[in-house]
């Protein structure tokens, strides 16, 4: 793997060239097709995944439907918790949304790495706390908010994480199906379709080549203010 690709990951951006080259020699690169599973909840985990390209969903199987917990893309990483916990069991499943390239670092290489460079572990802990806060927000959304409010909050969150300014507003730079959005908000696909059409008719959002543009951020925030 090209050592300079590691520079795009916050975990490694502070390391010198020699150390980056050493880490890159420990990594393997793997390609995944669209919709391919990477691992399943309950699997033993001994690999850290760095997203070189593509989009990954982290989800849990809630019997009747999947619940999407997070979406990761280029520059993100995942799978670290199973490497740090004694049980080494995956707490969720991972599957590609788009064709993806991942860099994989084995636990036998990862543990000596964080021992020799404790700043990497500090970065991982900071990311873990951010993800815990996001998980708590998701739980709150799913338990106390109505569906329209959940969708509005989810769209605002996606603009924060994946938004790109455009002439018409903020483009959510992900191609997500209505089923993906349903799995992110704990509702049915048909309900998501209806509510997205309502938001379009209210000129709060619009579609652009299978991506959503939020045209009126304040309008979406006003939906949250009515809680």
Image (cartoon, rainbow, N blue to C red):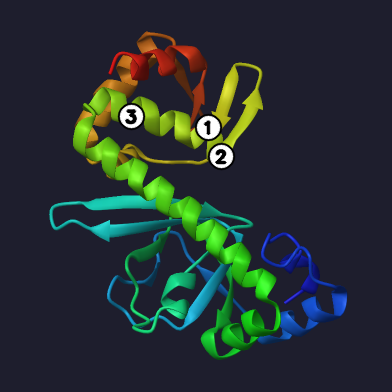
Instruction: Work out whether mark 2 precedes mark 3 in sequence or the reverse, and give the earlier one.
Output: 3
In the rendered structure, the answer to whether residue 152 lies left or right of residue 160 reads: left
Mark 1 residue element: helix
Answer left or right for 145 relative to 219: left
Is 169 placed above or below 51 here?
A: above
Tell me: residue 26, above or below residue 121: below
The foreground one among 120 and 98 is: 120
Quarter of the rendering occupied by the N terminus: bottom right
Q: Is residue 51 visible?
A: no
Q: How many marks?
A: 3
Secondary structure type for disc 3: helix
Name, please, the residue furthest toward the left. Answer: 64
User: Can residue 224 be seen?
Assistant: yes
The residue under label 3 is 151
Residue at 63 percent across and 88 percent down: it is 112
Label 1 CA crowd tier, 10 Å (few <14, some 14–19, many 20+): many
**Seen in the image, is 61 located left or right of residue 125?**
left
Residue 142 appears left or right of 177:
left
**Mark 2 — residue?**
162
Q: Quadrant of residue 12?
A: bottom right
Pointers 2 and 1 in contact (C-beta within 8 Å): yes
Residue positioned 54% across, 57% down in the render: 127
Q: Earlier in the sequence, mark 3 or mark 1?
A: 3
Could you tell me residue 92's position as x and y percent?
Answer: 32, 65
Label 2 to label 3: alpha-carbon separation:
16 Å
Instruction: Quote the CA–CA distance across marks 2 and 1.
Output: 5 Å
Picture residue at 27% right of the left edge, 23% below the top:
148
Return the mark for residue 72: none
Question: Label 1 belongs to which residue?
Answer: 159
């Amino acid at each position: 793997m090209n050592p300079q690709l590691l520079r795009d990951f916050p975990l490694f951006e502070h390391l010198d060239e020699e150390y980056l080259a050493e880490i890159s020699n420990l990594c393997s690169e793997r390609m995944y097709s669209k919709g391919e599973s990477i691992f399943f909840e309950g699997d033993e985990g001994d690999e850290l995944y760095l997203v070189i390209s593509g989009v990954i969903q982290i989800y849990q199987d809630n019997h009747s439907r999947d619940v999407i917990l997070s979406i990761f893309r280029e520059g993100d990483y995942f799978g670290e918790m199973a490497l740090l916990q004694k049980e080494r069991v995956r707490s969720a499943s991972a599957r590609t949304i788009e064709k993806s390239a991942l860099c994989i670092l084995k636990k036998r290489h990862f543990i000596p790495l964080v021992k020799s460079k404790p700043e990497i572990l500090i970065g991982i802990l900071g990311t873990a706390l951010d993800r815990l806060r996001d998980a708590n927000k998701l739980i709150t959304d799913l338990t106390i908010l109505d569906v329209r409010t959940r969708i509005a909050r989810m769209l605002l969150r996606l603009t924060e994480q994946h938004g790109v300014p455009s002439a018409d507003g903020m483009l959510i730079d992900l191609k997500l199906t209505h089923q993906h959005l349903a799995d992110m908000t704990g509702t049915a696909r048909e309900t998501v379709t209806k509510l997205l059409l309502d938001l379009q008719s209210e000129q709060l959002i619009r579609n652009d080549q299978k991506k959503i543009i939020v045209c009126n951020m304040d309008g979406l925030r006003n939906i949250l203010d009515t809680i």
